[in-house]
């Protein structure tokens, strides 16, 4: 009898739950881009036909929108890459023997960054480091570390210990067990933390405008300062759409790297 035949088939309830989860995931993957395109198309149609005064027209000019969007994306991407480079290796280290006792302390320190108000964190770093792009990156990186760090630790700790022991029994080194067993099984949990961090960074990147680091938050600031509701709403809408796109990209990446059968 083959190994495949020897494996127990999933129960009817488990199969239905898995099928329902797959349908929900596919619906989200297909529905989010459609929603973004519909809402963005509606905003573009409004922008082409709206009767704007000089200030509104200047703030909502296509080149200005493109520049601010690029700045916002750049802030998000750089901060997220730094979060991954710091949080994932740190989370792995804190699940290794000899370092696991430090995990609660490190997570508690990371929690301070997210517990503090985002605008306060940005301003404090700006006073210390100066008003520029990299100061915003430092603040946003600290703000986004917690979800990835926590989920990396939880995901690795949730791997079945018998699978780890089986890998070691097959002669795998500690590094091989980590890369071939632990990390693949922990990927879904880790990626959930990455998606959370991405959306958080997109949101707090709106505060970069207060320290001259750019981003779509400039539209919100201008709308509030000059009492231009159209500029204010446009800024909030574009940031929300960008957050949806980033969340969708995170879901696509999560689906792509998820091991088959999970």
Image (cartoon, helix red, strand yellow):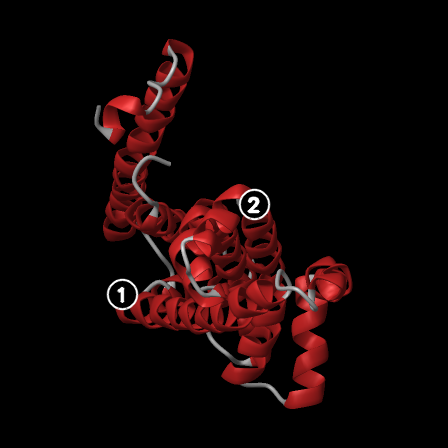
Between residues 212 and 173, which one lies in front from this camera angle? Answer: 173
Q: Which residue is label 2 attached to?
A: 161
Left or right: residue 51 versus residue 154 is left
User: What x and y, as percent, mark residue 110?
Assistant: 69, 65
- Say if 38 sits above or below 192 in the image: above
Report the residue at 70% width, 62% height from top: 100
Residue 14 visible: yes
Report the residue at 33% width, 65% height from top: 65
Q: Which residue ends up furthest to the top in the rendered image? A: 12
Q: Which residue is label 1 attached to?
A: 62
User: What x and y, as percent, mark residue 32?
Assistant: 32, 38
Left or right: residue 111 versus residue 246 is right
Q: Indicate the secondary structure of the residue bearing disc 1.
A: helix
Q: Indicate the secondary structure of the residue bearing disc 2.
A: helix
Q: Quarter of the image containing the C terminus?
A: top left
User: What x and y, as percent, mark residue 85?
Assistant: 48, 72
> How many other residues sit within 10 Å of disc 1, few (<14), some (14-19) or many (≥20)?
few
User: What x and y, as percent, mark residue 210?
Assistant: 59, 74
């Amino acid at each position: 009898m083959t190994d495949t035949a020897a494996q127990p088939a999933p129960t009817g309830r488990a199969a239905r739950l898995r099928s329902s989860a797959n349908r929900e995931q596919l619906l989200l993957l297909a529905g989010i881009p459609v929603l973004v395109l519909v809402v963005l198309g509606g905003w573009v149609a409004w922008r082409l036909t709206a009767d704007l005064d000089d200030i509104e027209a200047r703030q909502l000019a296509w080149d200005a929108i493109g520049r601010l969007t690029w700045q916002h994306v750049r802030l998000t991407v750089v901060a997220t890459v730094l979060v991954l480079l710091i949080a994932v290796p740190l989370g792995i280290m804190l699940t290794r023997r000899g370092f696991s006792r430090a995990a609660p302390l490190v997570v508690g320190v990371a929690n301070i960054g997210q517990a503090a108000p985002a605008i306060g964190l940005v301003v404090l770093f700006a006073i210390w480091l100066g008003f520029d792009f990299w100061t915003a990156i430092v603040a946003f990186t600290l703000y986004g570390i917690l979800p990835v760090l926590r989920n990396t630790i939880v995901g690795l700790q949730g791997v079945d210990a018998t699978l780890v022991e089986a890998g070691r029994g097959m002669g795998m080194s500690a590094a091989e067990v980590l890369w071939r067993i632990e990390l693949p099984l922990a990927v879904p949990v880790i990626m959930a933390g990455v998606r959370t961090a991405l959306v958080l960074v997109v949101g707090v990147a709106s505060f970069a405008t207060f320290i001259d680091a750019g981003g779509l938050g400039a539209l919100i600031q201008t709308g509030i300062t000059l009492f231009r509701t159209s500029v204010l709403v446009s800024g909030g809408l574009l940031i929300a759409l960008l957050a949806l796109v980033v969340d969708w990209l995170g879901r696509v990446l999560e689906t792509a790297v998820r091991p088959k059968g999970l």
